[in-house]
Amino acid sequence: MTGIETIFKIAGVGILAAVINSILDKSDKRELTTFVTLTALIIVLVMVINMLSSLLGTVQSLFNLYG
Amino acid sequence: MAIVKVIGIAFVGLICVGVLREVKPSLAVTCGIVTGLVIIYTLLDEFTYVVSKFNELAELAAIDNTLVKTVVKIIGIGYLTEFSANVAEDYGSPSIAKKIQFGGKICIAVLAVPIITGIITSIGSIAK
């Protein structure tokens, strides 16, 4: 989870969301596009939060910054 | 060499951010931050190597342990604040980045006070 594949995953989610949005536009379901964008953003943010928490944990333990 | 890996990851991340900027601008910034995270992960073992060597040198030179600990802490705080300030700027709010840097300065000042008092007392005792 800490390699380049995370970057590709995020790019994939972004492109997928864009494709789904364009499909929804074509089939006149414009109100669903906001939900698709929101879910894509949430998925990516959860991934980022996991990586960020592990990074901050390692930096804290590395420089013993407790308290 | 580690630097080649870092540059490779940076270019991959740049391309992904570029693609995402047209397709989905809100995710482009997140992808930039993840690229930074991945680069730091690849450099983590060099990081730990440097810090452990630093501690060994300090023990070799018989420097007071608390001194070394505060110096390492200050380095850590400096790094964390710089990282989060850059993230804040990426998200387009330099004012928050400045607040983070201001907070970092305060924390470092708090840590630096005992060192300064130690120096001044030692100078005072020498001057007597």
Image: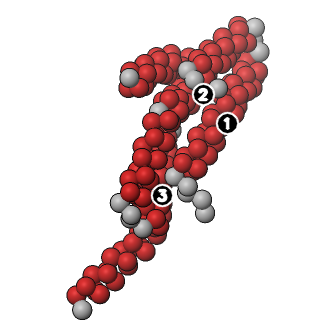
- In this view, the residue farthest toward the bottom is B128
Q: Is residue B74 visible?
A: no
In the rendered image, the vertical position of residue B51 relative to residue B23, given as above or below: below
Position of residue B109 in the picture relative to residue A30 (left or right): left
Q: Residue at x 48, y 58 (%)?
A: B73
Above or below, comparing residue B85 to residue B40 in the picture: below
Cα–Cα span, label 3 and label 2: 25 Å
Secondary structure found at label 1: helix
Residues at marks 1 and 2, common chain?
A: yes
Residue at 51% over, 52% down? A63
Give coordinates of residue B77: x percent, y percent.
48, 55
Question: Quadrant of the rendered structure where residue A36 is?
Answer: top right
- Marks 1/2: CA distance? 10 Å
Check whether the beta carbons of the residues at disc 3 and disc 2 lie within 8 A of each other. no
Chain for mark 3?
B
In this view of the protein, can residue B42 be seen by the observer? Answer: yes
Q: Neighbour class for label 1 at 10 Å: few (<14), some, many (≥20)? A: few
Disc 1: which chain? A
- Residue at 54 percent across and 48 percent down: it is A62
- Which residue is under mark 3? B73
> Mark 2: which amino acid?
Thr
> Which residue is drawn at the image coordinates 60% and 59% (left, top)?
A66
Q: Is residue B87 above or below residue B80?
A: above
Residue B126: percent from left, percent from top:
25, 85
Query: Which amino acid type is shown beneath numbered disc 3?
Result: Lys
Label 1 or label 2, whichever comes before in sequence order: 2
Which residue is denoted by mark 1 in the rendering?
Answer: A50
Quarter of the image that includes the N terminus of chain B = top left
Residue B82 x, y percent position in the rendering: 44, 47
The residue pinned by badge 2 equals A2
Residue A19 lies in quadrant: top right
